[in-house]
């Protein structure tokens, strides 16, 4: 049984195949509108989500399948003390594939160890978010035309950002992708996620903006700072506005996994380089490709 717990569960060839399937879905949606007819997706979301849960739901519906599950663990038997593994053993009787988000790192892995249906990790703690990574890769390829030979800057919370961890790991497998890290000392990327494609670490967006083909913004989380004076000192360095984009390439693209708070000002939204809302739409498409492929593998 194939699961997707971490982006490294997929080979580069398999990722590229998923991206190609996503492009085929974009071009020929009618080919896929009934490929999951009679199949059911269970969404087990133990922590809040808007984009990820709804995109999984929309993806399965557009493939012709149905969706069941819960969006609040308090409304499930988890509130009675049921374990993740027991929940999965129950739900696999009702569904053909499961998407799980959990606040605890490793919970989807535990689920996969007992599941007879494919498990998709929809985010576990600060560990990984592989379907967001696939979304990001599809967005990069659609926006700049390639997923190799480019420079990307990751800005904001690189310490706790699971989307950042997964994407850096994925990009390390593609040729000549240069990674620049932009973060305060308190939120720097942990050493275990550093790959050989990281070329430098800086503390302001402005000093590297002209070099970037992609700028990946994340929220600088005030609650992570023990010293609020330190937060006040650095917070404005990581707020993107039109002034900071003056030195950016016309072809550069801005990504953000969302939700945003104040790290990208609304004035940036109308700039053609702002790709973060298009990125949301790509999330539905790549999840369609992933659900379809995992169910195909499950047949073998």
Image (spheres, rainbow, N blue to C red):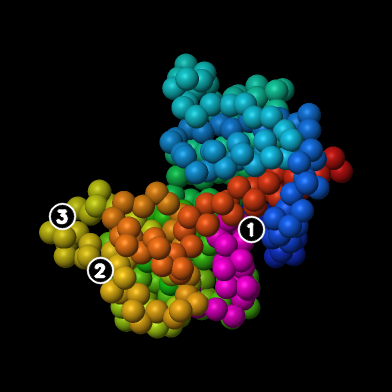
Q: Nearer the viewer, residue 280 or 228?
A: 280
Per the image, the residue denoted by label 2 is 237
Which badge, 2 or 1, is on the more N-terminal residue?
1
Q: Position of residue 220 (x, y in %)?
A: 30, 57
Circle 1 crowding by C-alpha within 10 Å: few under 14, some 14–19, many from 20: some
Q: Nearer the viewer, mark 2 or mark 1?
A: 2
Q: Is residue 104 visible to us here?
A: no
Q: Secondary structure at mark 1?
A: helix
Label 3 environment density (alpha carbons within 10 Å; few <14, some 14–19, many ≥20):
few
**Depth order, front residue of 74/205:** 205
Whether the magenta-drawn stretch holds residue 150 is answered as yes
Label 2 to label 1: alpha-carbon separation: 33 Å
Q: Which residue is mark 1?
A: 8
- The residue stretch that appears in magenta: 133-152
Element type at mark 3: helix
- Cα separation, mark 3 vs mark 2, equals 15 Å
Q: Which residue is mark 3?
A: 228
Magenta stretch: dominant secondary structure: helix
């Amino acid at each position: 049984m194939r699961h997707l717990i971490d982006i490294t569960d997929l080979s580069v060839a398999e990722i590229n195949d998923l991206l190609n399937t996503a492009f085929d879905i974009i071009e020929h949606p009618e080919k896929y509108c009934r490929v999951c007819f009679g199949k059911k997706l269970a969404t087990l979301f133990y922590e809040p989500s808007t984009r990820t849960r709804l995109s999984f739901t929309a993806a399965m519906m557009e493939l012709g399948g149905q969706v069941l599950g819960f969006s609040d663990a308090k409304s499930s038997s988890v509130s009675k003390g049921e374990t993740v593994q027991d929940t999965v053993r129950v739900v696999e009787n009702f569904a053909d594939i499961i998407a799980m988000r959990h606040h605890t790192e490793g919970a989807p892995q535990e689920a996969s160890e007992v599941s007879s249906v494919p498990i998709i990790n929809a985010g576990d703690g600060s560990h990984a978010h592989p379907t967001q990574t696939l979304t990001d890769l599809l967005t990069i390829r659609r926006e700049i035309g390639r997923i190799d030979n480019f420079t990307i800057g990751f800005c904001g919370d690189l310490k706790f950002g699971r989307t950042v961890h997964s994407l850096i790991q994925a990009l390390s497998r593609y040729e000549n992708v240069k990674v620049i890290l932009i973060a305060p000392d308190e939120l720097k990327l942990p050493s275990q996620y550093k790959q050989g494609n990281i070329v430098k670490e800086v503390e302001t967006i402005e000093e590297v903006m002209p070099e970037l083909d992609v700028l990946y913004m994340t929220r600088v989380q005030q609650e992570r700072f023990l010293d609020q004076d330190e937060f006040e000192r650095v917070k404005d360095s990581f707020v993107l506005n039109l002034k900071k984009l003056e030195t950016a390439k016309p072809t550069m693209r801005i990504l953000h996994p969302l939700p945003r708070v104040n790290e990208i000002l609304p004035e940036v939204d109308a700039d053609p380089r702002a790709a973060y809302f298009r990125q949301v739409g790509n999330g539905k498409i790549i999840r369609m490709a992933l659900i379809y492929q995992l169910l195909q593998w499950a047949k073998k």
